């Protein structure tokens, strides 16, 4: 996959793209990333990229011409028109599903806005507007990095050989089960005995149940959409009984009912 990033702050991308899995993906040729400094496409001695808002008010607004010129430069080299993704708090909420879809593209363009806003006509240069969550950042650079990371790890080969069990759609839509490594006891806390038992079927069923428990207690909203088997429904019933009879079966991180999806004012 090839990625072009249009930004006023190309320096912000140096760290995250040059470490760990993204570094390896780039070195292996599975991922190539070109940064484009929008300021380089601005005209005049001062290469101004922002201006005062028409109608007055505080803050500066990103001008459309430098962004359009940078995008024209990138699109002129593309054999076919790629998705142009505007990082934007008002955009469609980015999800794992969207990460998987974008991972099938051969070329993506990221538009990172800054300042207090962008000229509305920049929006029309994008094919999609994406938000990584209901909060406002100083710019679209961090959201672009988040999305590039999530998309890159879904490109076949980037994470190494696919794990057939965990890639299985049956696991999708649920939170991960708890994992452990050595030592078998840490600060008085033992690794669950079933994981040391070598009983593969018992381990599979324990993991599935703990995935369901986590999801039920922390993200009950996800359960409504997850594909659940007859076994899953049986395990969920066991979990509900355990939670009702045992304080320890409750999850301290579980949100109060109705505490999720707060209204967002931006
Ligand atoms: C305001 C995305 C701020 C408007 C970008 C961009 C958070 C996110 C910004 C724009 C961002 C997010 C209209 C492009 C930049 N902050 N939640 N800041 N537009 O994904």
Image (cartoon, rainbow, N blue to C red):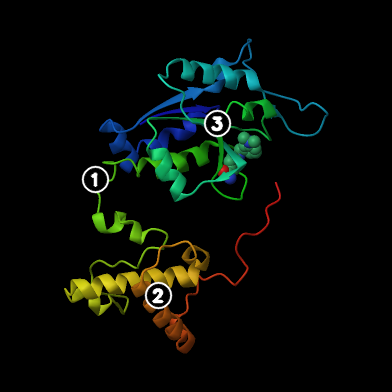
Residue at left 46%, top 44%?
98
Query: What element does badge 1 sit on?
Result: loop
Residue that mark 3 sits on: 127
In the displayed structure, would residue 265 be above or below residue 215?
Answer: above
Q: Which mark lies nearer to you, 2 or 1?
A: 2
Residue depicted at x 60% and y 19%: 66
Using the image as rendered, state which of residue 188 and residue 261 is in the foreground.
261
Q: Nearer the viewer, mark 3 or mark 2?
A: 2
Q: Mark 1 points at which residue?
A: 160
Mark 2 lies on a secondary structure that is: helix
* Residue neighbourhood size for the residue with mark 1, other residues' Cα within 10 Å, grouped as few (<14), some (14–19), many (≥20): few
Q: Image quarter for residue 155?
A: top left
**Is residue 5 visible in the rendered structure shown here?**
yes
Rendering coords of residue 36 (x, y %): 48, 23
Residue 3 is left or right of residue 65, and the answer is: left
- Which residue has dot 2 on it? 233
Near-viewer residue (161 or 66): 161
177 vs 115: above or below: below
Left-right relation of 79 to 26: right
Asked whether 139 or 210 is in front, the reply is 210
As measured in the structure, the alpha-carbon distance from the residue carrying label 3 to the one carrying label 2 is: 41 Å
Q: Quadrant of ligand 1?
A: top right
């Amino acid at each position: 996959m090839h990625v072009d990033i249009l930004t006023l702050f190309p320096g912000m991308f140096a760290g995250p793209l040059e470490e760990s899995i993204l570094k390896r993906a780039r070195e292996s040729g599975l991922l190539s990333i070109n940064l484009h400094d929008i300021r380089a496409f601005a005209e005049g001695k001062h290469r101004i990229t922002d201006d005062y808002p028409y109608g007055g008010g505080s803050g500066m607004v990103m001008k459309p011409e430098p962004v359009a010129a940078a995008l024209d430069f990138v699109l002129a080299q593309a054999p076919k028109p790629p998705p142009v993704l505007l990082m934007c708090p008002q955009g469609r909420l980015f999800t794992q599903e969207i990460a998987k879809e974008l991972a099938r593209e051969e070329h993506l363009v990221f538009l990172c806005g800054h300042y207090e806003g962008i000229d509305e006509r920049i929006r029309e240069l994008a094919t999609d507007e994406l938000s990584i969550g209901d909060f406002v950042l100083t710019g679209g650079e961090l959201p672009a990095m988040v999305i590039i990371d999530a998309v890159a790890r879904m490109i076949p080969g980037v994470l190494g050989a696919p794990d057939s069990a965990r890639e299985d759609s049956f696991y999708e839509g649920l939170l991960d089960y708890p994992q452990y490594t050595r030592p078998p006891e840490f600060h008085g806390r033992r690794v669950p005995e079933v994981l040391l038992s070598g009983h593969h079927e018992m381990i599979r069923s324990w993991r599935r149940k703990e995935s369901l428990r986590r999801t039920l207690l922390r993200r009950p909203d996800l359960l409504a959409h997850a594909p659940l088997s007859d076994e899953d429904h049986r395990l969920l019933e066991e979990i509900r009984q355990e939670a009702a009879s045992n304080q320890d079966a409750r999850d301290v991180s579980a949100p109060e009912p109705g505490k999720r999806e707060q209204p967002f004012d931006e």
